Image (cartoon, grey):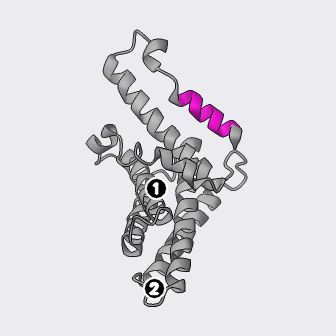
Amino acid sequence: MQASLSYLEAIEGTNPQEKRPDAPYDLVTRVDDLAHWWSEMVAVGVHWSSAECSKAEKYYHALSSLPETYLRNHEDDISHLPQAIHDIFRARSGLLTRTMCPFAVNKLCNKASQQLTEDILTSANQKQHLRQGFQMLACDWLLKTRTELWDQETDSPGGSVNAKDTATGFKTDLNNLQKLNDKHKGNDCITL
Protein backbone atom coordinates (compact mmCIF):
# COMPACT_ATOMS: atom_id res chain seq x y z
CA MET A 1 0.00 0.00 0.00
CA GLN A 2 2.81 2.40 0.84
CA ALA A 3 4.36 1.89 -2.61
CA SER A 4 1.02 2.78 -4.20
CA LEU A 5 0.88 6.01 -2.24
CA SER A 6 4.45 6.86 -3.27
CA TYR A 7 3.52 6.51 -6.94
CA LEU A 8 0.39 8.59 -6.44
CA GLU A 9 2.36 11.33 -4.71
CA ALA A 10 4.75 11.34 -7.67
CA ILE A 11 1.81 11.86 -10.03
CA GLU A 12 0.48 14.68 -7.88
CA GLY A 13 3.87 16.37 -7.98
CA THR A 14 4.30 16.22 -11.75
CA ASN A 15 3.79 19.10 -14.11
CA PRO A 16 3.14 17.80 -17.63
CA GLN A 17 3.80 21.25 -19.09
CA GLU A 18 7.45 21.01 -18.03
CA LYS A 19 7.81 17.60 -19.67
CA ARG A 20 6.03 18.47 -22.92
CA PRO A 21 6.54 22.16 -23.71
CA ASP A 22 5.37 21.56 -27.30
CA ALA A 23 1.90 20.43 -26.16
CA PRO A 24 -1.00 22.89 -26.43
CA TYR A 25 -1.80 24.46 -23.07
CA ASP A 26 -5.43 23.29 -22.94
CA LEU A 27 -4.40 19.69 -23.60
CA VAL A 28 -1.80 19.85 -20.83
CA THR A 29 -4.30 21.31 -18.38
CA ARG A 30 -6.94 18.72 -19.28
CA VAL A 31 -4.58 15.77 -18.89
CA ASP A 32 -3.17 17.21 -15.69
CA ASP A 33 -6.61 17.77 -14.15
CA LEU A 34 -7.80 14.29 -15.06
CA ALA A 35 -4.62 12.58 -13.89
CA HIS A 36 -4.75 14.39 -10.58
CA TRP A 37 -8.44 13.66 -10.06
CA TRP A 38 -7.98 9.93 -10.74
CA SER A 39 -4.79 9.71 -8.68
CA GLU A 40 -6.51 11.39 -5.74
CA MET A 41 -9.46 9.01 -6.09
CA VAL A 42 -7.04 6.06 -5.98
CA ALA A 43 -5.26 7.58 -2.97
CA VAL A 44 -8.59 7.74 -1.15
CA GLY A 45 -9.17 4.08 -2.02
CA VAL A 46 -5.75 3.10 -0.71
CA HIS A 47 -6.38 4.92 2.57
CA TRP A 48 -9.88 3.46 2.91
CA SER A 49 -8.49 -0.03 2.29
CA SER A 50 -5.88 0.56 4.99
CA ALA A 51 -8.56 1.80 7.43
CA GLU A 52 -6.91 5.25 7.41
CA CYS A 53 -10.06 7.29 6.89
CA SER A 54 -8.61 10.44 8.44
CA LYS A 55 -5.75 10.39 5.91
CA ALA A 56 -8.25 9.94 3.07
CA GLU A 57 -10.14 13.04 4.19
CA LYS A 58 -7.37 15.35 2.98
CA TYR A 59 -8.46 14.50 -0.59
CA TYR A 60 -12.20 14.96 -0.08
CA HIS A 61 -12.33 18.63 -1.03
CA ALA A 62 -10.46 18.12 -4.31
CA LEU A 63 -12.83 15.27 -5.21
CA SER A 64 -16.04 17.08 -4.30
CA SER A 65 -16.84 17.64 -7.98
CA LEU A 66 -16.14 15.96 -11.29
CA PRO A 67 -13.44 17.45 -13.52
CA GLU A 68 -14.83 19.95 -16.02
CA THR A 69 -13.99 17.68 -18.96
CA TYR A 70 -16.42 15.04 -17.71
CA LEU A 71 -19.11 17.63 -17.05
CA ARG A 72 -18.86 18.94 -20.61
CA ASN A 73 -18.98 15.45 -22.13
CA HIS A 74 -21.94 14.16 -20.13
CA GLU A 75 -23.45 12.49 -23.20
CA ASP A 76 -20.35 10.35 -23.82
CA ASP A 77 -20.33 6.79 -22.56
CA ILE A 78 -16.92 7.56 -21.06
CA SER A 79 -18.70 9.73 -18.49
CA HIS A 80 -20.57 6.78 -16.93
CA LEU A 81 -17.55 5.44 -15.06
CA PRO A 82 -16.29 8.77 -13.66
CA GLN A 83 -19.84 9.64 -12.61
CA ALA A 84 -20.27 6.25 -10.90
CA ILE A 85 -16.93 6.56 -9.10
CA HIS A 86 -17.71 10.12 -8.08
CA ASP A 87 -21.19 9.26 -6.77
CA ILE A 88 -20.01 6.29 -4.75
CA PHE A 89 -17.11 8.38 -3.42
CA ARG A 90 -19.61 11.00 -2.24
CA ALA A 91 -21.86 8.34 -0.69
CA ARG A 92 -19.02 6.50 1.04
CA SER A 93 -17.29 9.63 2.33
CA GLY A 94 -20.64 10.99 3.53
CA LEU A 95 -21.34 7.75 5.38
CA LEU A 96 -17.86 7.52 6.92
CA THR A 97 -17.84 11.15 8.08
CA ARG A 98 -21.52 11.00 9.06
CA THR A 99 -22.17 14.18 7.08
CA MET A 100 -24.89 12.59 4.96
CA CYS A 101 -28.13 11.02 6.09
CA PRO A 102 -28.63 7.31 5.33
CA PHE A 103 -31.40 8.05 2.82
CA ALA A 104 -29.06 10.33 0.79
CA VAL A 105 -26.25 7.75 0.97
CA ASN A 106 -28.56 5.04 -0.36
CA LYS A 107 -29.85 7.31 -3.11
CA LEU A 108 -26.28 8.07 -4.27
CA CYS A 109 -25.44 4.36 -4.13
CA ASN A 110 -28.40 3.62 -6.38
CA LYS A 111 -27.35 6.34 -8.82
CA ALA A 112 -23.73 5.10 -8.83
CA SER A 113 -24.90 1.53 -9.34
CA GLN A 114 -27.01 2.56 -12.33
CA GLN A 115 -24.08 4.45 -13.88
CA LEU A 116 -21.74 1.52 -13.24
CA THR A 117 -24.18 -0.94 -14.82
CA GLU A 118 -24.38 1.29 -17.88
CA ASP A 119 -20.59 1.53 -18.07
CA ILE A 120 -20.17 -2.24 -17.79
CA LEU A 121 -22.70 -2.73 -20.60
CA THR A 122 -21.18 -0.12 -22.91
CA SER A 123 -17.64 -1.41 -22.39
CA ALA A 124 -18.50 -5.11 -22.55
CA ASN A 125 -16.36 -5.83 -25.60
CA GLN A 126 -13.47 -3.53 -24.73
CA LYS A 127 -10.22 -4.73 -23.21
CA GLN A 128 -9.26 -1.72 -21.10
CA HIS A 129 -7.60 -3.02 -17.97
CA LEU A 130 -7.48 0.34 -16.23
CA ARG A 131 -11.18 0.89 -16.81
CA GLN A 132 -11.94 -2.62 -15.60
CA GLY A 133 -9.90 -2.01 -12.46
CA PHE A 134 -11.94 1.10 -11.70
CA GLN A 135 -15.17 -0.80 -12.37
CA MET A 136 -14.04 -3.37 -9.78
CA LEU A 137 -13.14 -0.57 -7.37
CA ALA A 138 -16.60 0.96 -7.80
CA CYS A 139 -18.23 -2.44 -7.09
CA ASP A 140 -16.08 -2.83 -3.99
CA TRP A 141 -16.98 0.62 -2.66
CA LEU A 142 -20.67 0.10 -3.43
CA LEU A 143 -20.82 -3.25 -1.65
CA LYS A 144 -18.88 -1.98 1.38
CA THR A 145 -20.96 1.17 1.62
CA ARG A 146 -24.26 -0.69 1.35
CA THR A 147 -23.10 -3.23 3.96
CA GLU A 148 -22.07 -0.50 6.40
CA LEU A 149 -25.30 1.38 5.73
CA TRP A 150 -27.28 -1.80 6.36
CA ASP A 151 -25.40 -2.39 9.62
CA GLN A 152 -26.01 1.17 10.79
CA GLU A 153 -29.67 1.05 9.87
CA THR A 154 -30.36 -2.31 11.53
CA ASP A 155 -28.63 -1.11 14.71
CA SER A 156 -30.89 1.94 14.97
CA PRO A 157 -34.63 1.62 15.65
CA GLY A 158 -36.82 2.98 12.85
CA GLY A 159 -34.04 3.32 10.27
CA SER A 160 -34.64 5.74 7.42
CA VAL A 161 -33.63 3.43 4.56
CA ASN A 162 -36.00 0.89 3.09
CA ALA A 163 -34.44 -2.55 3.73
CA LYS A 164 -35.90 -3.93 0.49
CA ASP A 165 -34.38 -1.07 -1.52
CA THR A 166 -30.98 -1.63 0.11
CA ALA A 167 -31.14 -5.38 -0.53
CA THR A 168 -32.17 -4.82 -4.17
CA GLY A 169 -29.27 -2.40 -4.67
CA PHE A 170 -26.87 -4.84 -3.05
CA LYS A 171 -28.06 -7.59 -5.39
CA THR A 172 -27.53 -5.30 -8.41
CA ASP A 173 -23.99 -4.57 -7.25
CA LEU A 174 -23.28 -8.26 -6.73
CA ASN A 175 -24.58 -8.94 -10.25
CA ASN A 176 -22.24 -6.27 -11.60
CA LEU A 177 -19.35 -7.84 -9.74
CA GLN A 178 -20.30 -11.23 -11.19
CA LYS A 179 -20.40 -9.76 -14.73
CA LEU A 180 -16.92 -8.32 -14.23
CA ASN A 181 -15.68 -11.60 -12.77
CA ASP A 182 -17.11 -13.61 -15.67
CA LYS A 183 -15.62 -11.17 -18.16
CA HIS A 184 -12.18 -11.43 -16.61
CA LYS A 185 -11.85 -15.10 -15.76
CA GLY A 186 -8.25 -16.07 -16.30
CA ASN A 187 -7.13 -12.44 -16.35
CA ASP A 188 -4.53 -12.12 -13.61
CA CYS A 189 -3.92 -8.41 -14.03
CA ILE A 190 -6.94 -7.28 -12.01
CA THR A 191 -6.77 -7.76 -8.28
CA LEU A 192 -8.30 -5.85 -5.42
- Residue 33, given in percent of the width and then of the height, sits at 40, 32
As shown in the figure, which amino acid type bears the numbered disc 2?
Lys
- Magenta segment's dominant SS is helix
The residue indicated by pointer 2 is 164
Residue 5 magenta: yes
SS for dot 1: helix
As shown in the figure, which amino acid type bears the numbered disc 1?
Phe
Q: Is residue 40 left or right of residue 64?
A: right
Quick one: label 1, few (<14), some, or many (20+) residues within 10 Å?
many
Among the 4 quarters of the image, the one containing residue 5: top right
Which residues make up the magenta segment? 3-11
Viewer-nearest of labels 1 and 2?
A: 1
Quick one: label 2, few (<14), some, or many (20+) residues within 10 Å?
few
Residue located farthest toward the top when viewing the structure as drawn: 22
Rendered-image quadrant of the N terminus: top right
The residue indicated by pointer 1 is 89
SS for dot 2: helix
